[in-house]
Amino acid sequence: MKTNTLLFTLLLFAVFSCSKNVEYSEAFKKETSGKYLYTQDDLLEVYYEDNDLYLKWRGAEKIKPVVLSRDEFFVADMYKKLRFTKHPDTKEHYISIVPEEEGKAITYDYLKVSDNYKTPSQYLQDGNYEKALQGFLKIKQADSTSIAIRERSFNQIGYDFLRDKKYEEAIEVFIINKELYPNSSNVYDSLADAYLRNGDSLKAYENYSKSLELGNPNMKAINFVDIYRKKLEE
């Protein structure tokens, strides 16, 4: 472990010692600044202060990369060497990961998106649940194991809303979870809880019933469905 740490430190020292002073033109700044799609639910933002290049990424507001040339820079937080590129066919702007092996083909990794682009999680935070759902479904289609769409995470968000008595918001989040995991008994149980607290007994009954149908042995659900069914039969 000590050897690896030493090698990493030496590598960082070597990279930082190579940092260059580059004069960026205003046209280049305009062309390269903005948002890049790091993952389908994660943005990397490039901006400039005077002649200095900075990044925003995963909560860090001011990451200063090591500038290697006008187009290339090293980001210690990512442990990646990156390059501004433009696709020859689509003319779209990207940030590409510079391959370690010389001569290896350029990959177009992080697409530049519009300044008003939002990730599904950002739509969720804004309360735009329809667009959030559309985005999360696309993520699931591309990668059903993505950490951006974990069932447990949505469940936690929904119950946080319930604790704050924000019942409508909780329902919307649980609906997203239901659409992502339609065969999970737990998502219907949570949705039923939210409907019940919001005063919608019929929706609670429907979702508790679906939860039980999918194999949830929750006694609260069993008792509620039993009582409600008897009322319907009266």
Image: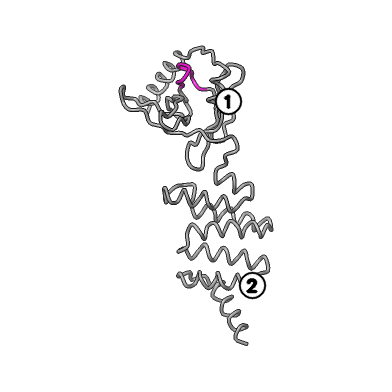
Image location (x, y in percent) of residue 163: 65, 57
Image location (x, y in percent) of residue 68: 45, 17
Q: Amino acid at mark 1?
A: Tyr
- Residue in the picture at 49% in, 57% down: 180
Q: Amino acid at mark 2?
A: Ser
Estimate how packed mark 1 is, as few (under 14), some (14 to 19) or many (20 or more) residues with alpha carbons within 10 Å: some
Residue underneath mark 1: 47
**Foreground pick, 12 / 205:** 205
Quadrant housing the C terminus: bottom right
Q: Secondary structure at mark 2?
A: helix
**Up-down: is 101 above or below 186?**
above
Quadrant housing the N terminus: top left
Residue underneath mark 2: 201
Inspect the magenta stretch and tell me whether residue 85 lies in it: no
Image quadrant of residue 100? top left
Region of the chain picked out in magenta, as a range? 65-73
Q: Secondary structure at mark 1?
A: strand
- Residue in the picture at 59% in, 49% down: 124
